[in-house]
Every structure is written in C-alpha cells, then in structure tokens.
Image (tube, grey):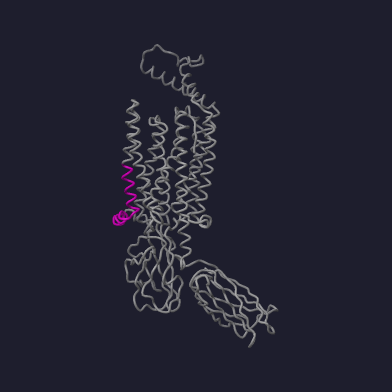
Amino acid sequence: MSATAPYAGPSPIRRPLAAAALLAALVSLVFGLLLAGAGPASAHAALTGSDPADGAVVDTAPKEVTLSFSEAIAVGDDSIRVLDPSGKRADTDTEPKDLSEGSTVRYGVTLHSGLPDGTYTVAWQAISADSHPISGAFTFSIGAPSETTVALPSQEAGGGPVGVVYDIARYAAYGGFVLLVGGSAFVLVCWRGGATALPMQRLVVRGWLTLTAATLVMLLLRNPYTGSGKFADAFDLAGLQSVLDTKPGAALVSRLLLLGAAALFIAVLFGTYARREDEREKKDLTFGLAVGGGVVATGIAATWAMSEHASTGIQANIAMPVDVLHLLAVAAWLGGLASLLVALYRTPDIGSAAVRRFSAVAFGSVVVLAATGIYQSWRQVGSWSALTGTRYGQLLILKVALIAVLLAVAWFSRRWTGRLTDSAVASEDASEEEPESESEPESVSADPDPDPERAAQLARQRAALTATKKKRIRDADPQRSGLRRSVLAEAAVAVVLLAVTTMLTSTEPGRTEEEAAGGTTSASAPAAGGPVNLKMPFDTGGQNGKGTVRIDIEPGRTGSNDLHVWIDGSDGKPMDVPELKLALTLESKDIGPLPVVPDRLAEGHWSASAVQIPMAGDWKIDVTVRTSDIDQVTIDKNAKIG
C-alpha cells in the first residue's frame, strides 16, 4: 500500500531528470535481462507421451503415430508430420485426427502401409489453449535404427526475432494497461483536480497509445509468431484471417474495439469533465465516468483472461473473473503509484486529501491482490514441490518477495504522509499576497503604462517570481523530500514487479510442468544427456575371481547408444573372462530387463553398438561376470540416462 502526502509544486529540474533517468535505466536493465535470458516463451501445453515413444525401436511398422498433451491445443494442416529417413512424408493425413477422450488430449496421423525399416522423425507444432505456440520433434525406428537426412529445426515455435518483438509488445501492453486504467482511476477517485493537469493527461494518453500500439503489433505478428517466424508474413491476409478465427486473435480484436471506447472516455475525462465547474453536475459526471470506465477497464482485462492461463486448466469458469480482478487491482495500485509520482514531481497543487484517498485505494488493491493471488498460486502451482522446483514457482516466489519489499517501502511513505498537512500550500498562497520585496527588479514593479503587451510581459515576470518562491518553500520542506524519495523507490520496485508478473504469463505453470514430467514417455524432443561412466568391483569367490568392471555408455541418452565394457583384475591389468552379460531395467516404468550381449574386442575389452534405450530415467544396469565353470556373480548399479 502506498501512502503519500500533498505536494506543493514542481521539484527542481535536476531531480525529475534524475528520477526519469533512474527509472529508464531500471526498465532497460530489467527488460534486457528478461529478454536475453528467457528466449522463446515457454510452452504451456506439454507433450506428455507418444506412441511410438521417443527413441523406441518397433519390430513392425505402426499404422499411426499418436501424441498426447497435458492440455487442449489447436492444430492445423501439417501440425504433425512424420518423415522417413530420406525426408519424405510417411503420413497420409494433412490435418491430424482428434483422438481425445475425456480429459486425455491426443492427436494422431495415419502412416503409409509397407514402410521400410529405418529411423523416422516426428515433427509437430501447435498452439496451446493459453495462446502460446509449442513445437518439438522426436524419432523412432522400425526394425533397426538408421541414418537419416532429416534436419530438425533449431528454432522453437515463438522464437527468433519475431518472438523477441512479440514479447516486447506483450510487456508494453501490460505497462500501457497499468498506466491507462491506474491513471484514470487516480484522477476520478483520488484527485479530481488532476483532470486539468497536463502531466496527468499525458500519462493516461501515453498509456492508451502504448497499449493500442502494442495490441496492433501483436495482432500483425501473431501469424508469423505461431508459424513461419518471418516478419514478411505479418501482412499475409490469409494468415491474418486465420488468426482472427482463433481465440487469441478474437481477444486482440476485442481489445482494439474496447480501446476505441477508452479513447472516448479519455476525451470526456480531460475535456468536458475537466471544464465542468458546477459541483453537482461534476459529481453526476464522475459517477457516469466511473461506471463507464469500469466497464471498459474490465473488458480490456478480460481480453487477457480469455486467452491466457486463466482460460485453460482446472476451474476456468472461476479463474477468469479472478484473473480480471487481479489485473484491475494491479492497475489501480501500480498505475496509481505512477500517477502519484508524476503528481509529486510535475504538478503544483495535489493536496493531502488526495494522497490519503490513494492510500485507501492502494490498501484495497493489496487486499484484492492477496486474495486473488493465493487462488491463482494454488491453481497454477498445486504443490510445494512445484513451487520450489519449477521456473513458474521460482518466479512466483520472487514476485511475492518484491511485493513484500514494495509494502515495506510503502510503510515509510505512509509515515511521511502522516507528518504532512496542507500548511505548505497555505504558506505558498499567503506568499502570493505579500508585498513585493525591495529586492525585486524595478521592471516588475507596478507600471502605470496601459500598454497591453507591456502588462502581459510584467504578468509573466511576476508569475515566474511567484513560481520561484513556491519552489523554494517546497524544497525546504524535508517531509516532502522524504516522501518523494520513498515514492520513487516504490515506483522502481513496481517496475521490476510488473516485469516479473509479465514473465509469469509466458512461463509454463508449475502444475502443468510436473504433470508433463510425470508422463509415460519422454517429452517433446530427444532427451539430452551425457556419457555414462560406471565402475563396479566384483568377486566371484573363486581363484582369480576379484576384479573391477568399467562401463561407458555413449552418448548416454534415449535412442541408440554405444556400450563399452572393460574388466581389470585385482592387479589392475586387463582380465579376460569366459562370459560377460548385461541387462538394463527401468524399474519405475516396469521396463526390462533388456538384455545386452557385448562382443569381445580385445583382452579385457567388450563392446556393443546400437544399444537401444527407449526412455530417459534411472536405469539399473546388471552385469553378470563368470570367471570359471562354476564361479560367477551378478552385480548392479543405477545410472541416470537421458
């Protein structure tokens, strides 16, 4: 909650410039770090399984390939493609078949009959229910693995330069919404006199312009963002038409229409309303603007709720209105804080009553944020392990910490507010009626010359002197200086908080990430791993029965691997044995034991090529060593593969 105090006029020029420079640098730093480190937006629907599985080797060609997802997706032509080793299409369906049943989301394509042996590549791309593009690829083999000429795309859907610009527009849209809604609410609820203040008008109008421009950019880039990744496709009319037929496209168009109504609201607020002098008429107009503006603001907030996290997953019918309330509370708090900062630095006559009204609005916003935030956190995270073990959960912890810092700084602002009254304003008004000092230049003294041009010049000189006196009075007030510093600190923390909040909307929810991790097959692309190196001592109990088994598995991931085994005797020299066998078991999935019989290459060295590991996990490797006709032992050790 921000608590603030009256301000008695513009601060020195250097302070606003320093404040603006500080905020600009902070914004650049935050967004630079976010965009540099985040890359493409994380997929919110996840591939939870496939048949055949990633890296699997099947004896006969399957009739179809199916993919399962953690939540609803939108697919189109060529969303799932199966390519043979030469890169030719092996599937017969242009558009995937919807095989979903109940809560299981599954799509599939039919394969050509009589497919030859070899390694096949499955490439897929879709749009998750919360508007974010997702893509991936994996391989499976028929009969035995083979070389393939298929080059998998290195860029994920939603990445590249188009993805960067689209993400910038997303951040800008949230910022514009906060300034537009929060600034308007500040004028109507906290400081009606702000309707005539040019800096306040500029703040709200710039928020409207930013949100409008960002929405237009997102609408034009939506087609290349979810498809080709090329800027030239932004003006493809067929692609634009396909975007308008989707839920995110409809949300963006609805936002533009509502922004047209918002433009009319701004014109009335800073036009008719600002000029209205009759208090009763102004009160009636305030009520009308508050109702109309509230409807428009709610509608704009709903365009996010209907197309992002809140629109999919559990309890969507509850989550969407909760998300709208959350966004409105953020705008009222942070947008009001930005308005207060502008009022403190750039306007001369905001009073303590307006500041205290904003404190009440901020407190109410914090209460709403706490209630809606707790529900959203439960819905998107779902467990303590997801809170600490997923990117979404970690960002959520950071957001809560920033809110705590913001509230702590706001407490200091409230203390400054409690010490302030409008006495300084009264002193300034009184100073205007004091006789001009003897030190004033002679040119400013009363001049009987009736020349209108001369009189106007003298009036301007007197106004400048009066402004200088007011500025000295304000700058000499330590309470006001302390308040300005604390509010500036609040605004700085709020910038970071808004950036983190925007990041949360482009990050896979913790609940979804954990569900995807618990799927029955590997995820969207072959799991990356590294070489596995094991060392296991053994003792068969017979003569010369002690030694050490060393095993290397490369590349140590799902799919085809090369396996090498060395046996060293107790003296450290290579040791030959009559028989060596291995078996791999993934106990968590009841897979195996998969037997491996290596070939002897040299004394104490065995090797097996094309060892197929169908799934990533914690594999148990059993090694049987026989050193004589009757002496043998089986030892085992676990290794993470993939």
| Magenta stretch bounds | 236-260
Location of residue 529 in the rendering, given as x and y in whole percent from the top left corner: 53, 67
Question: With respect to residue 449, does 414 lie above or below?
Answer: below
- Horizontal placement of 259 versus 605: left or right? left
- Nearer to the camera, 478 or 119: 478
- Horizontal placement of 199 versus 288: left or right? right
Image-quadrant location for residue 598: bottom right
Question: With respect to residue 527, does 363 lie above or below?
Answer: above
| Residue 218 covered by magenta stretch | no
Residue farthest along the bottom direction in this orientation = 629
- Nearer to the camera, 290 or 114: 290
Location of residue 506 in the rendering, given as x and y in whole percent from the top left corner: 44, 53
Q: Residue at x 35, y 32 (%)?
A: 286
Location of residue 433 in the rendering, given as x and y in whole percent from the top left corner: 46, 16
| Residue 239 covered by magenta stretch | yes
Question: With respect to residue 103, does 359 lie above or below?
Answer: above
- Nearer to the camera, 240 or 340: 340
Examine the residues drawn in magenta and state their main secondary structure. Answer: helix
- Horizontal placement of 136 versus 578: left or right? left
Location of residue 427 in the rendering, given as x and y in whole percent from the top left corner: 49, 21
